[in-house]
Image (cartoon, helix red, strand yellow):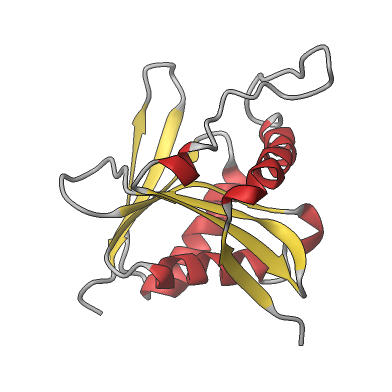
Amino acid sequence: MVSIDLFPARESQLLLLKNLWQLYSHDFADYLDDPVNEQGLFPYDYDHKRYFEKSGFWPYIARVGGRIAGFSLVSDRVMQRPGPGRYIDDFFILRQYRRQGVGRSIAFQTFDTYQGYWEVSEIGPNKPAQAFWRQVLKEYTDGRYVETSFTEQDGIEIILQRFDSASW
């Protein structure tokens, strides 16, 4: 059986995160109008350095059989309550590893890293991500999660799930 592992990213892997971000952005192009620039790259307006330079941010690299498979970016910037918690800022699994249990395993490993309050969100148009997270959270929490939605200032609907594993 091939191992599915989640490792804390090192600062020397910043370029790896930036490169994976391009693939992640390509996937998002199905849902958001974010064209590539004149160099053929998606706009790079995401501050990955904060994951290495600021407290409250944790980057992880996913591997399958030792090979790069994606990332899980976590922060303490929860939206729905004051106080401590964790938020999945961004989560990405390369297409070649999807529908094989890799995303589920990496999500479970991410949640197991920090027991307590968690939030996960998806944009309204991204129905596959919503289906993925609903299934993962149903399994991980045994159905003990809450889902709400709201609209951001730019008109994008956000689906938000939250749970607290501190009492389990």
34 and 53: which is toward the camera: 53
Label count reads 0
Tell me which corner region of the image, top left, top right, bottom left or bottom right, holds residue 10: bottom right
Left or right position of 148 against 66:
left
86 and 47: which is toward the camera: 47
Position of residue 161 measured from the top left corner of the image (x, y, whole percent): 37, 52
Left or right position of 66 against 71:
right
Q: Which residue is drawn at 29% across and 45% down?
A: 78
Left or right position of 148 against 63:
left
Tell me which corner region of the image, top left, top right, bottom left or bottom right, holds residue 77: top left
Position of residue 111 measured from the top left corner of the image (x, y, whole percent): 42, 67
Which quadrant would the C terminus be assigned to in this image?
bottom left
90 and 68: which is toward the camera: 68
Position of residue 63 measured from the top left corner of the image (x, y, whole percent): 70, 66
Position of residue 134 measured from the top left corner of the image (x, y, whole percent): 48, 59
Q: Which residue lies furthest to the top in this view?
A: 38
Left or right position of 60 against 22:
left
Q: Residue furthest bottom?
A: 1
59 and 2: which is toward the camera: 59
